[in-house]
Image (spheres, grey):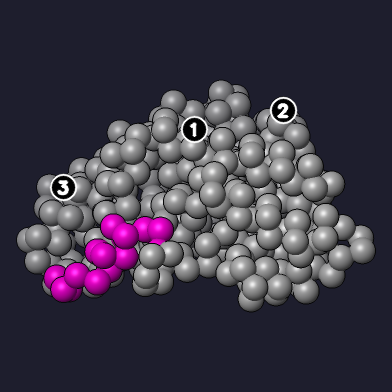
Amino acid sequence: MPVVDRHLFGPGPSNPYPEATAALGLPLLGHLDPEFLRILDETCDRLRTVFGTANARTLPLSGTGSAGMEAAFVNAVHPGDVVVVAANGLFGERMIDVADRCGAEVVPVRFPWGTPVQPEAVLAAHPSPALIAVVHAETSTGVRNDVAALGAVKGDALLLADCVTSIGGIEVAVDEWGVDIAYAGTQKCLGVAPGLAPFTIGERAWGRRVLRPRSWYLDLNLLGGYVGAAAGTSGRTYHHTAPVAMVASLHASLGRIIAEGLDVVAARHHEAGRALQDGLAELGLELFAAEGHRLPDLTTVVVPADVDSATVRRTLLQRYGIEIGGSVGEYADRVWRIGLMGHNARPDAVALVLGALREVLKR
């Protein structure tokens, strides 16, 4: 994960998430302990707030963001369903693969990496898909896709959105945008260690769900009992042993975000991202994502032709404690990804990374 402060979860004054790490260090509760169940229910409620939804079935799945992707498709896609996937990066391509494994008739709609999804092209791909899938914030390219525009034209199709890199950093409005299913991860703007997948599914999608998904572990019919009343069920039943420390950590981090205010958090990320991107331009560096569609929390930069990407990244890490990511595939050594997520979306982090790049690149 590309971050400015490599000590994302470590001890000491550099730790930017004291609430989340403190919760990880608390004495462990049993997964059926009444106090843990209270924390779990409150975590589900806080997830509704950050997702912008009233969906009863909103919960933290026990698994990384990729488990959220898998859960979305195995519970919503019946064999033979037409699934249109808008892909403009690695995670859109992964959606295509997962949908295909579910037995869907997949209709990929691909766009050049670094450019946004065009809703009209997605809509024109098939007259009556069962589901349309899109990545809101494409982590591999730093592009923000217009989910709301797809929600406005989806018709009877279900709309599935990957919100891994957007939740807790930029606006996410599941109900307002007409999103039927959404999933996320904890390790980006939420500022929690990787290991949980915030997930929400609305009534339209629930009414069309697969009644016996291929995955027992990710079967939402069973997981509804796991979270009990928080998912609109009458009681709570055992499904699996919950990662209690991770849920407590997420609970604490969501509380911090809500206390700061979602609008304030989004503005802070926007201001930090704009300052970073302006500073990179002043250094003579080219931004990769199309202007007007750049994520503020994850900035992609074209590696200069005379620069060895791996050497620069290693120097930044060893000399300054700054970690930036490369991209993937053909862009692995051609694009840098610089994250300003959660606590790192602040002016001193921007100054640190720009100063270090100026020194390393001799600009």
**How far apart are the two marked residues, 2 and 3, measured between alpha carbons?**
40 Å
Residue 205 in view: no
Residue 229, disc = 3
Residue named by callout 1: 267
Q: Position of residue 88 (x, y in %)?
A: 72, 47
| Residue 120: mark | 2
Q: Quadrant of the C terminus?
A: bottom right
Mark 2 falls on what kind of element? helix
Asked whether the beta carbons under mark 2 and mark 3 sit within 8 Å of each other, the answer is no
For image coordinates 61% across by 68% down, the residue present is: 320
Which is closer to the viewer, label 2 or label 1? 1
As displayed, is residue 126 above or below residue 226?
A: above
Q: Is residue 254 above or below residue 216?
A: above
Q: Give the vertical position of 318 relative to 327 (above or below).
A: below
The amino acid on which the numbered mark 3 sits, given as a three-letter code, is Ala
Which residue is pictured at 40% across the width and 71% down the height?
A: 10
* Image coordinates for residue 360, horizontal then vertical, percent: 76, 65
| View extreme (right): residue | 306
Q: Residue at x 37, y 58 (%)?
A: 17
Who comes first in sequence, dot 2 or dot 1?
2
Q: Identify the residue shown where x is 57% and y is 63%.
A: 1
Mark 2 / mark 3, whichever is N-terminal: 2
Q: Please provide the residue range marked out in magenta.
A: 15-29
* Residue 46 numbered tag: none
Residues marked 1 and 3 touching at CB (< 8 Å)? no
Q: How many C-alpha atoms fall within 10 Å of the one at disc 3: few (<14), some, or many (≥20)?
A: some
